[in-house]
Image (spheres, grey):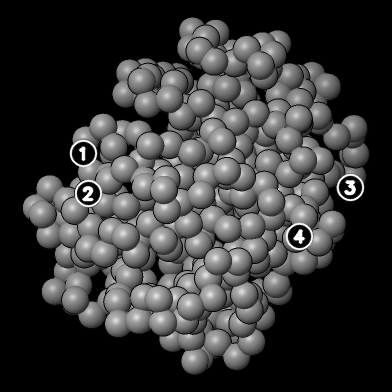
Amino acid sequence: MARKLSRRRLLQLASGAGIALVAGCGSESGDEVPMVDPSAVVTPVLETVAGYDDPRKWEGRTLVVASPGDEGSDYLVAQTQAIFEPFQRLTGATVRVARTELEELREQVNTAEVLWSVCDIPSEEVLPLANSAILDEIDFDIVDAGELFAPFVMQHGVGASLYATALSYFEDPVAPIAAPGSWADFWNVADFPGPRGFQETPIGTLEFANLAAGVSPDDLYPLDVDLAFRQLTVLAPNIILWWRQGAQPTQMIAAGDLSMVAAWHDRILQLEASGAGVGLTWNQSQINGDSWVVPNGAPEPELAMDFINFATRPEVTAAFSDLFPFGPANSGAYELLGSSNAGELPGAPAILDKQFVIDLEWWFKNREPVQLRFEEWLAEIQEDA
């Protein structure tokens, strides 16, 4: 991507931003969560944010934010540069960073020993956690949801950023064929031969199977689960990869070991930018994302809500998407993004009508039985292979 930082630059930023993490705050080192050091950031990527002009507002107060980004990862570097450092500098709060672990989050709340004030978690986990009384309600008197991505505005969480799972394909230089453009093409092994791959999860996989069968994106939910498994059974002999780590599909598609794979968009865009012979289609790609949440009983709840409001402002979400190719959760960010970047982000106006959004409520109500059926089906076809 033209506006994405080079890996060398990202590593430079990581070392310059003083980023460090602990595995979980329940450990013996839990009280020593590293601080985001604004003085180590040579060139701030965000000078001002509307409504945040009092650098002493939260002076003397500490906010612990749990992020899924690994130490030194592109994701965490982008969060530090675009969110953590500006919030600390513009409000006077001290920001410390931990590593999000869902089991650790549950344990903290259930033992009433909550150390995290804000967490960045997968959006499909918000409703299950809220239903278990793990999360506090979002205070929408503080968090302005007016321009936020509506499907991810929930009682107990709001969208942090958007990603997509998309149909990705190998561009064979020896025997080139037309690029696939839909999940029906993914299932069409006669015209598009070669091995396939999916993430080892029913989320997305069942939707893609329904789309391949001709179901309209507007009619996807409630999902026809029986239809999905019939479709998957037909394609099963051609599926050689059920991936669990994002690096697996990218390595195999770049090497030509897969002809097509359902993969995270950012991984494929990075391959394209490196010159690898791969492509993706935004058509029928699934939008999912991460969400900001506040643990039930979190310290500094008012500060936490103000941080979430800050982190979802147009300027802040645009700055994050400029550094990392996830879509902004605030629609106002697109006016601030460069045109070369804005059209290649999930949820972007130029491609939104080609995509569909995960139905978080349907998966909350149906995930457990569907997950069990998926695991049983997968074990059966692997045994028969």
Among numbered discs 4 and 3, the one appearing first in the sequence: 3
Among numbered discs 3 and 2, the one appearing first in the sequence: 3
Whether tag 4 and tag 2 are in contact, CB under 8 A, the answer is no
Count residues near mark 3 (Cα–Cα under 10 Å), then give few for <14, some for 14-19, many for 20+. Answer: few
Location of residue 233 with respect to 154 vertically, above or below: above
Left or right of residue 155, residue 385 in this image: right
Task: Give the percent coordinates (x, y) of residue 105.
Answer: 24, 53
The label on residue 133 is 1
Q: What element does badge 3 sit on?
A: loop
Instruction: Look at 68% across and 41% down and name the residue there.
Output: 347
Among numbered discs 4 and 2, the one appearing first in the sequence: 2
Q: What element does badge 2 sit on?
A: loop
Whether tag 1 and tag 2 are in contact, CB under 8 A, the answer is yes
Count residues near mark 1 (Cα–Cα under 10 Å), then give few for <14, some for 14-19, many for 20+. Answer: some
Among numbered discs 1 and 2, the one appearing first in the sequence: 1
In this rendered view, identify the residue nearer to me: 380 or 16: 16
In this rendered view, identify the residue nearer to me: 59 or 38: 59
Displayed quadrant of residue 384: top left
Q: What residue type is labelled 3?
A: Pro
Question: Is any part of residue 53 visible from this angle?
Answer: yes
Location of residue 130 with respect to 80 vertically, above or below: above
Residue assigned mark 2 = 296
Left or right of residue 42, residue 57 in this image: left
Residue assigned mark 3 = 173
Left or right of residue 199, residue 164 in this image: right
Q: How many labels does the image show?
A: 4
Spatial CA distance of label 4 from label 2 is 35 Å
